Image (tube, grey):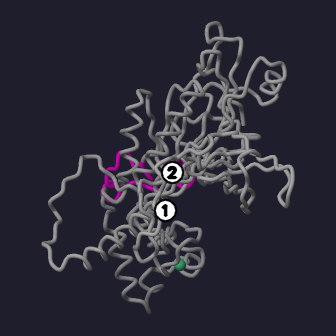
Amino acid sequence: MRVFVLDKNLQPLDPTHPARARELLQKRRAKVYRRYPFTIVLQDRTTEGSVTHPHRIKIDPGSKVSGFAIVQEETGRVTNALEVSHRGQQIKDSLESRRALRRGRRNRKTRYRKPRFLNRTRKSGWLPPSLESRLANIETWVRRIRRLCPVAAISQELVRFDLQQMQSPEINGVEYQRGELFGFEVKEYLLQKWDRKCAYCGAENVPFEIEHILAKSKGGSNRVSNLCLSCHSCNQAKGNKPVEEFLKKKPDVLKRVLAQAKAPLKDATAVNATRWELYKRLQCTGLPVEVGSGGRTKFNRKTRGIEKHHWTDAACVGASTPEKLLINGVKPLVIKAKGHGKRQRCGTDRYGFVIRHAPSQKFFMGFQTGDLVKADILTGKYAGTYTGRIAIRFKPSFKLTTGGKNFDVHPKYLKTIHRADGYEYAS
Ligand SMILES: [Zn+2]
């Protein structure tokens, strides 16, 4: 993990080793600019005369967590890694609860009113708020990284598999070869086609094997229409038996397997609207955006012998991945999206009755909910030093959350170390 460096005019320089950053700070040649991600600003140097190297932001967008890796292109060093957890589910839940309250109120308060629907239009490119928030998180972090690091390009995982530009592999007779890049693409295709379930017993969330419906020893081919997904025990039990014999007692399963094997996967199921929208928005940054498939990511990671994490997957996205990725000592910065508060002015109880009103101000005594603070409490039950996140109240008694517990603290003991920016950090 390296430290981001800015010059005197806040222009990004190459990230540096933490030891070098410490030295610069000790000699007072640099000051701390940001705590998360850790950034220093040089006091005596401008970008003129200093050489920067192009870096690449690599993104593996996920539904719960998105991985980011910043890779220096020439050396293949992963200089920084981030893992951003999204709050899609939280947004969905709160919108649904609001909807339920409104619906209940409408039923109670209006005896009959014509239903109004299908009379609203949405802008093109509209996404549900839960998905929009994921995109916004990724855009935010790309923008923030670009301010801290000389970024020349972006790589993004776009599709799960890429069988030569999505031509139907069943018809064109694409063949599976173990361990090749193409084999990984075929595996991802099969995972999608068989819905991540064992074709014979329906088991989920187990390691899957690629199963030849007509065994290879009986002349079965490697063509995609002869392959399905099975769990280890089904694969062992079937052996090289013909599928008709193996599924003799389950005729309905046999029928389904044979039908599904022939049916090509519809293109629509493989296209993920959110990721395409992300691709469009990343292109708006003006940087060249490279796209990769999930199959290639896995191939890159396996051939380089790298463990699976969100950030390592990100580092392996795309064809531009260097032959040797230097990932020793990299620890990802774990980031959790927290939002910026809500717009609702009326807080309700669980029956929808208004019980409180939100204050119009967000600041009190220079603090805001979500600030990361250092507390130096001199006396009392909670005497000691803590760092944590505060929730403000409009009286000098804030709630400090630190290490899983929380208690009230007077703001006179607090010093802000990182202002609320919609995210929570753990490192
Ligand atoms: Zn099975």
Q: Residue 35 in the image: state x and y as whole percent.
A: 69, 36
Question: Which residue is most to the front?
Answer: 395
Is 276 placed left or right of 21 in the picture? left
Q: Residue 351 in the image: state x and y as whole percent.
A: 42, 77
Q: Nearer the viewer, mark 1 or mark 2?
A: 2
Look at the picture and state if 104 lies above or below 123: below
Q: How many marks?
A: 2
Q: Magenta region's main secondary structure?
A: loop
The answer to which quarter of the image holds residue 347 is bottom left
Marks 1,2: beta carbons within 8 A: yes
Q: Amino acid at mark 2?
A: Gly
Q: CA distance from mark 1 to mark 2?
A: 10 Å
Look at the picture and state if 409 lies above or below 21: below
Q: Residue 224 in the image: state x and y as whole percent.
A: 41, 61
| Magenta span of residues | 159-182
In reply to whether residue 245 is colored magenta, the answer given is no
Which residue is at a point 43% across and 47% down the rendered structure image? 135
The answer to which quarter of the image holds residue 383 is bottom right
For residue 90, the mark is 1
Quadrant where the image shows the N terminus: top right
Q: Residue 176 in the image: state x and y as whole percent.
A: 47, 56
Q: Nearer the viewer, residue 288 or 240?
A: 288
In reply to whether residue 163 is colored magenta, the answer given is yes
Look at the numbered disc 2 and give the secondary structure of its residue. Answer: loop
Q: Amino acid at mark 1?
A: Gln
Q: Which residue is mark 2?
A: 339
Look at the numbered disc 1 and give the secondary structure of its residue. Answer: helix
